[in-house]
Amino acid sequence: MPNSTSKLFKSQQFEVEIRNRFSVHDEGDLDNWENLRDSVQKVIKDVLGLKTNSKQDWISDSTRDLIDKKREARLKQDKPLHKKLTKECRAQVRHDRQLWADTLALEGESLLQSNQFQDAFTNLRKLRPANINFPARG
C-alpha cells in the first residue's frame, strides 16, 4: 500500500499534468466533451498507470495487450477484427490458465515431497473452483 508521501506526490503530479494539458487547449476544445474526457484519461494513465487485476494475476502481459486490442476493435465497431481477436483471446487465456495450473501443481508436488503438507494443500486448493459445494454429512 503506498504511503502518504507517494500519494501526495502523485496528487501534485496529476494536478500539474492537468494544468499543463488544459493550458494548451483553447476554449473551443474544452467545449467538446470527448476531448476533455480523453485528455483527463490520458493524464490519469500517464501519472497513475493502469490498475492491475490482482484477481487474475496469471494472465500474461501479451494476453492483456490482446484484450486491449479486442476492446479497441469493439469500440471501433470492426466486427470481423473483433471476432478474430476474440478467438485469439480465448485461446491465449486458456493457455495462460493452463500454464498457471501446471506451475501450481508442480509447486504442490514438490512441497508434498518435502513433507510441507499444509503449504502443499494451500497451494493445491487454489486449483479448485471456488463455487464447489460439498454435500453435508449427516
Image (cartoon, grey):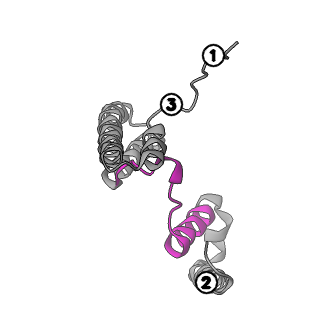
| Residue closer to the observer: 83 or 108 | 108
- As displayed, is residue 90 above or below residue 8? above
Q: Residue at x 50, y 58 (%)?
A: 52
User: Residue tagged by mark 1?
Assistant: 135
Q: Amino acid at mark 2?
A: Ser
Kindly state the secondary structure of the residue where label 1 is placed: loop
| Residue, far top | 138
Dot 1, how many residues are within 10 Å of its Cα: few (below 14), some (14-19), or many (20+)?
few
Q: Amino acid at mark 1?
A: Pro
Left or right, 66 with reference to 119:
left
Dot 2, how many residues are within 10 Å of its Cα: few (below 14), some (14-19), or many (20+)?
few
| Residue closer to the observer: 126 or 112 | 112
Which numbered disc flags the more N-terminal residue, 1 or 2?
Answer: 2
Q: Amino acid at mark 3?
A: Pro
In contact (CB < 8 Å): disc 3 and disc 2: no
Which numbered disc flags the more N-terminal residue, 1 or 3?
Answer: 3
Segment tinted magenta in the rendering? 35-60
User: Residue tagged by mark 3?
Assistant: 129
- As displayed, is residue 71 above or below residue 48? above
Q: Residue at x 30, y 33 (%)?
A: 91
Which numbered disc flags the more N-terminal residue, 3 or 2?
Answer: 2
Considering the whole magenta stretch, tell me its main secondary structure. helix
Provide residue 76's location: percent of width, then percent of height: 44, 43
Q: Residue at x 57, y 79 (%)?
A: 21
Left or right, 131 with reference to 65:
right
Kindly state the secondary structure of the residue where label 3 is placed: loop
User: Residue tagged by mark 2?
Assistant: 6
Provide residue 9's location: percent of width, then percent of height: 62, 86
Dot 3, how many residues are within 10 Å of its Cα: few (below 14), some (14-19), or many (20+)?
few
User: How much space separates mark 1 and mark 2, taking CA atoms?
Assistant: 49 Å
